Amino acid sequence: MFSWTPNTPAAMAEIDPTFIQPVEHRPKLTFTDSGEIPVVDLSALENGAVDLLVTGIGKACEEWGLFQVINHGVPLDLVRSMETAMKQFFDQSTDEKRKVKRDETNIMGYHDSEHTKNVRDWKEVLDVAVEDPIVVSASPDPEDQELKKCYNKWPEYPPDFRKIWKEYAGEMEKLAYKLLELVSLSLGLAGDRLNEFFEGQTSFIRLNHYPPCPSPELALGVGRHKDAEALTILFQDGVGGLEAMRKNGEWVGVKPIPNAFVINIGDIIQVIIESDDLKQMSISFEELNGILSKDVWSNDKYEGVEHRVVANTEKERFSIPFLFSPAHHVNVKPLEELTDELKNPPKFKDYNWGKFMATRNNSDFKKQAVENIQIHHFRVS
């Protein structure tokens, strides 16, 4: 099994074939800065310019599915403390990190062999849930109503990791609800319209470490994908490497802005949710394996952006995404307020978030015979 250590020069490592991307998805390694990715100043909330802010966010969601926020209210010293704790954790030996390794039973913890679209990512991660334990579906089987509890695996080092993480998670939650309200308002909904779906949330924070890569022309830190959750709030360091695909198919860099967060609109916002009894769900695995791509809640008005992370030979990169996700029992479907059977019929079938999540997790540990589940698998043909 391929492994790395931070002190090993990338040029001395050999790349395992499981990391190699198909030819058509390999990066060009030339940075293209669009200069157009929207930057939203959240200080407008304090200045009374909420209407302009809502309009700006709506435009960013519709045209890009991604934007950056500044003046967001998250204490910068806390962000730095979280970044330092993350680096201290990943700087340990592989054996130490694997003391908190996740597995197919407990989805929280350390992992160094994640796959995106059936190709292994050039990264290692630590996942920690906001609610501990996190309650999830026990299996992808639509007929299986069994639930399981997954407990966080807390690192012993650094010793203040848990304290710092909890403070950071609290700030991420506050910012997530603030952004969710603004997105709701931009869709013409009540600001708190979507809040109920996050009671018993399955949100988690992922710490990402991307070591230097000896063959960045062959591998990706993270392969191309769209986020399955509702919103992603991403801290990225100054190294760069995050790329987003424009609607014309061009990959452009998301240039790091000091003290800013990158916000991704997730697939769930594209579809939009209603919470029903789990028994009402009757989606086969084949159907489940075919619908996630634009935001379901909004019935395609807002589309999540496809993105990836490009590796490099010299610098390690760190990032911290907060993935804001609903409760396991929530059924995702276009909101009635945003659909009309004649003028704007639903473009997605219902799907259960817990079952979707269980199916997606199955593809994290090994290559599958088919593409891991995506939102487009639920699109109405």
Image (spheres, rainbow, N blue to C red):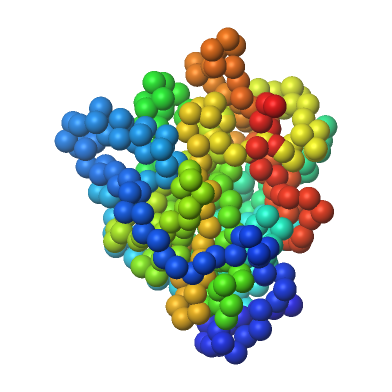
Residue 228, picture quadrant? top right
- Taking the spot 69% from the left edge, 23% from the top edge, the residue there is 277
- Residue 358 in view in this figure: no
- Taking the spot 67% from the left edge, 70% from the top edge, the residue there is 19
x and y percentages locating residue 61 in the rendered image = 41, 37
Q: Nearer the viewer, residue 179 or 102?
A: 179
Instruction: Give the residue furthest to the left.
Output: 47
x and y percentages locating residue 50 in the rendered image = 25, 30
Q: Looking at the picture, does residue 122 appear above or below residue 66?
A: below
Q: On the picture, is 360 further left or further right than 258?
A: right
Q: Looking at the picture, does residue 374 appear above or below residue 25?
A: above
Instruction: Give the residue furthest to the top.
Output: 342
x and y percentages locating residue 330 in the rendered image = 62, 30
Q: Nearer the viewer, residue 193 or 241?
A: 241
Quadrant of the drawing holding the N terminus: bottom right
Residue 267, picture quadrant? top right
Residue 107, picture quadrant? bottom right
- Taking the spot 62% from the left edge, 85% from the top edge, the residue there is 13
- Taking the spot 48% from the left edge, 28% from the top edge, the residue there is 301
| Tag count | 0
x and y percentages locating residue 158 in the rendered image = 47, 73
Q: Looking at the picture, does residue 257 appear above or below residue 123?
A: above
Quadrant of the drawing holding the C terminus: top right
- Residue 374 in view in this figure: yes
